[in-house]
Amino acid sequence: MVILGIETSCDETAAAIVENGQKVLSNVVASSVDLHAAYGGVVPEIAARSHIESIIPVIQEALKDAKTDWNQIDAIGVTYGPGLLGSLLIGVMTANTLAIAKEKPLYGVNHVEAHVYGAFLGSDQPAFPLLALIISGGHTQLVLFKNHFDYQVLGQTGDDAIGEAFDKVAKMLGLPYPGGPAISELAKKGDQNAFSFPTAKMQNPYDFSFSGLKTAVLRTAQQLAGKDYTLPSTDLPGLLNNRQKADIAASFQECALKTVVNGFNKAAAQYSPASLVVAGGVAASPRLREMLASEVSLPLFIPDFSFCTDNAAMVASNAYYQASLGRPPADPYKLEADPSLSMLSPY
Ligand code: KG4
Ligand code: ZN
């Protein structure tokens, strides 16, 4: 079964062709990240406008790269939430229209769930029950999958997502957006024990919180700059030296990553899953991969770098499993974008 996946939930316009949920025939991603960098974060209107410009060429390129034509496409999968409304609308309306015009079954895909399907892209498949840690710019969740589409959210963040914390700390240090890769690089030059940042204690041991950590980093940086809490964070990059910035990056990264790795390990000990999956943009972190390699003994699946950050191959894979398990396709006249689509009450 050959599926065209379409993903436009944030600032990446993506299309991919995937065979049987596993074999990626093409994977095209056009990002508007450079346009957002000047603003230090994603500007929804810019993202939506750039999806409009890119979506058709990106789909055409995905078909061309896979040496496929529409006759060989069996179904379409599209992210319909969660995400930015204006961005989701472009993908959903394009997919609805193509499903009608080309007479293809259409599957609506939950973006956060799809991140886990990045781990199914390959010949080696994770076994159920599967414990997934989904860490991205928009989400931080621990989810126990008993089977495909049969899961329980064990915990999630009560405030910022972990990737968002990386992006905000990066901004304080004058690093470019998105902050994760820049913090990773700078942290290599710093001392991870230079500062001891706090970890939030949550009632549910699988919930997370990153806003306290972000504030602690801000206060430490203000002190190092010789100022009090009234100093605007935008003044920090000019007042901190390179050594101080690298030490903050390393200590923050260690604390943030330890928080999610500890929750993951605790859940693995309690639920004894058959496999572990770490997915989402933050799973690209080399330091996280190092920590997991030394601490985790169960079979661990981390998607290839290009399938960690937003892409449409993971969307096509999710749609394949929906189709192969006999779930009914969506009505292309009715499928709508749902910016706050949740994982809390699946199907
Ligand atoms: O999954 P993704 O591409 O988009 C969302 O669905 O949010 O994740 C993007 C996030 C950004 O916050 C970015 O800073 C973070 O992933 N990220 C990283 C690294 N590479 C990307 N965070 C930490 N370390 C990295 N190396
Ligand atoms: Zn994502």
Image (cartoon, helix red, strand yellow):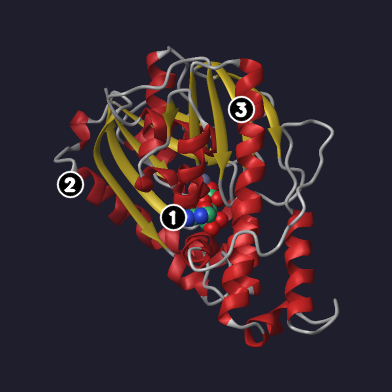
- Residue in view at x 57 percent, y 34 percent: 133
Residue linked to disc 2: 64
218 versus 112 height, above or below? below
Cβ of disc 3 within 8 Å of ligand 2? Answer: no
233 versus 79 height, above or below? below
Residue 31 locus on image (x, y percent): 40, 60
Q: Secondary structure at mark 3?
A: strand
**Quarter-wise, where is residue 99 in the image?**
top left
The N terminus lies in which quarter of the figure? Answer: top left
Query: Relative to 163, is 91 on the left or the right?
Result: left
Q: Is residue 89 visible?
A: no
Cβ of disc 2 within 8 Å of ligand 1? Answer: no
| Contact check, label 3 and label 1, Cβ < 8 Å | no
User: Observer-nearest residue: 222 or 125?
Assistant: 222
270 versus 28 height, above or below? above
Which of pointers 2 and 3 lies earlier in the amino acid sequence? 2
- Residue in view at x 66 percent, y 52 percent: 255
Q: Is residue 137 visible?
A: yes
* Foreground: disc 2 or disc 3: 3
Which three-letter amino acid code belongs to the residue tagged 3?
Val
Residue 108 locus on image (x, y percent): 49, 31
Which of pointers 3 and 1 lies earlier in the amino acid sequence? 1
- Residue in view at x 60 percent, y 20 percent: 151
Cβ of disc 1 within 8 Å of ligand 1? Answer: yes
Which of pointers 2 and 1 lies earlier in the amino acid sequence? 1
Which three-letter amino acid code belongs to the residue tagged 2?
Lys
